Image: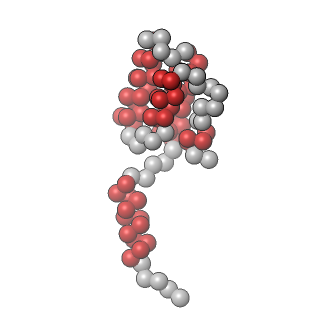
Amino acid sequence: MTVAEETAPGATLQTAAAVKLHADIAPCESPDHLDAICKLVWAAHFANELPEHEATFLAACIPLCRACPRISASRRRRRTSFRSSAPLRP
């Protein structure tokens, strides 16, 4: 199960701001970007754009993304090129 599937909003997120922030969390690849989104979540909460239960849910999604192993684009290219350059064996 992917992080996006584990943190699927379902009926939990009701505001447009929460849905947008949730969509920004899963594709993050750097801890700095996740930190920035976490700050946006709580800033939106304190600006009364997000109810507390939605802010808490979104904040709980962020550690799941941090724990998910990410493969950088350069590593993906190396893996692909390594496999394609290997000789085929019968």
- Residue at the image point whose x is 52% and y is 28% from the top: 19
Residue 24 in which image quadrant: top left
| 79 relative position to 50: left or right | left
- Residue at the image point whose x is 41% and y is 65% from the top: 79
- Residue at the image point whose x is 55% and y is 41% from the top: 4
- Location of residue 69 in the rendering, given as x and y in whole percent from the top left corner: 49, 48
- Location of residue 75 in the rendering, given as x and y in whole percent from the top left corner: 38, 58
Question: Tag count in the figure?
Answer: 0
**Residue 66 vs residue 21, the one in the foreground:** 21
Residue 4, above or below 13: below
Residue sticking out furthest to the right: 11
**Residue 11 vs residue 61, the one in the foreground:** 11
**Residue 67 vs residue 89, the one in the foreground:** 89
Residue sticking out furthest to the front: 16
Residue 64 in which image quadrant: top right
**What kind of colouring is applied to the model shown?**
secondary structure
Residue 69, above or below 6: below
- Residue at the image point whose x is 43% and y is 82% from the top: 87
Residue 89, above or below 16: below
Residue sticking out furthest to the bottom: 90
- Location of residue 57 in the rendering, given as x and y in whole percent from the top left corner: 57, 25
